[in-house]
Image (spheres, grey):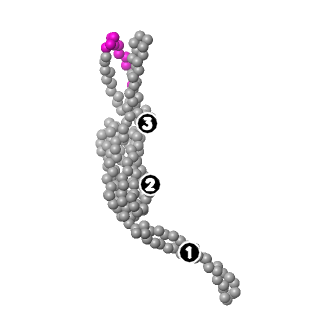
């Protein structure tokens, strides 16, 4: 954007309007996704400075998920958001994880300007109890969007453990001691 100069008479006020097109700034944005606008006024030896910072706010993620699910069974989660820019969003990804949910990465189709996006994903929880599903949307032109939803996972906790046993016996035919090692696997359920 170029510098503009306007001459004013003593105590005169004016507003300066300008249009900042996304093509001019979108490739120059830093990781903070902010635009800094600065205005300077000079009168004789006096200089006045005013500035404004515009921060791109990420739109909220709307997550639709069931309240209760069964242990180790697939369930659907719908993630929705709106593109707030007048520019197409490309190369977006969704990362979903939880304590009983293995981290998964999903690609999001390109989102047209000011359009809504909806992604339907399948998840499975391997942990009984309250599961917090954390959803993170990463978009190159906006700050990352993070949201979460709680789901109650119903089922029976199963605990599996192994026990090694070692027995020494005497081989009666050869009169030689032998050692037998065996592995016993056990499982119990917790209600």
Q: Which mark is residue 32?
A: 3
Label whose residue precedes the other's in the sequence (2 or 3): 3
Residue that mark 1 sits on: 183
Q: Position of residue 157 (x, y in %)?
A: 42, 67
> Looking at the rendering, which quadrant does residue 145 occupy?
top left
Q: Which badge, 1 or 3, is on the more N-terminal residue?
A: 3
Report, in whole angstroms, how far the alpha carbon at label 2 lies from the one at label 1: 33 Å
Residue contact at pointers 1 and 3, CB within 8 angstroms: no
Per the rendering, the mark at residue 103 is: 2
Frontmost residue, 88 versus 45: 45
Kindly tell me whether residue 121 is visible in this rendering.
no
Residue drawn at (30%, 40%), measured in percent from left and top? 114
Q: Is residue 101 above or below residue 164?
A: above
Q: Tell me the SS state at disc 1.
A: strand
Quadrant where the N terminus is found in the figure: top left
Furthest toward the front, the residue is: 191
Q: Is residue 184 left or right of residue 73?
A: right
Q: Which residues are magenta?
A: 1-12
Q: Find the residue positioned furthest to the bottom.
A: 173
- Element class at badge 2: loop
């Amino acid at each position: 954007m170029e510098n503009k100069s306007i001459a004013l008479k003593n105590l005169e006020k004016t507003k300066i309007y300008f249009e900042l097109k996304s093509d001019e700034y979108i490739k120059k944005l830093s990781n903070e996704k902010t635009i800094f606008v600065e205005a300077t006024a000079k009168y004789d030896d006096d200089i006045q400075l005013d500035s404004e910072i515009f921060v791109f706010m990420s739109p909220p993620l709307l997550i639709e998920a069931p309240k209760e699910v069964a242990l180790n069974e697939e369930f659907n989660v719908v993630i929705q958001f709106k593109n707030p820019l007048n520019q197409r969003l490309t190369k977006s990804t969704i990362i979903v994880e939880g304590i009983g949910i293995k981290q998964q990465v999903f690609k999001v189709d390109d989102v047209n300007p000011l359009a809504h996006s909806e992604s339907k994903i399948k998840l499975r929880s391997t942990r009984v109890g309250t599961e917090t599903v954390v959803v993170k949307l990463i978009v190159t032109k906006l700050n990352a969007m993070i949201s979460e939803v709680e789901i109650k996972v119903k089922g029976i906790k199963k605990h599996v453990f192994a026990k090694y046993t070692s027995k020494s016996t005497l081989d009666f035919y050869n009169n030689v001691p032998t050692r037998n090692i065996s592995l016993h696997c056990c499982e119990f359920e917790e209600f």
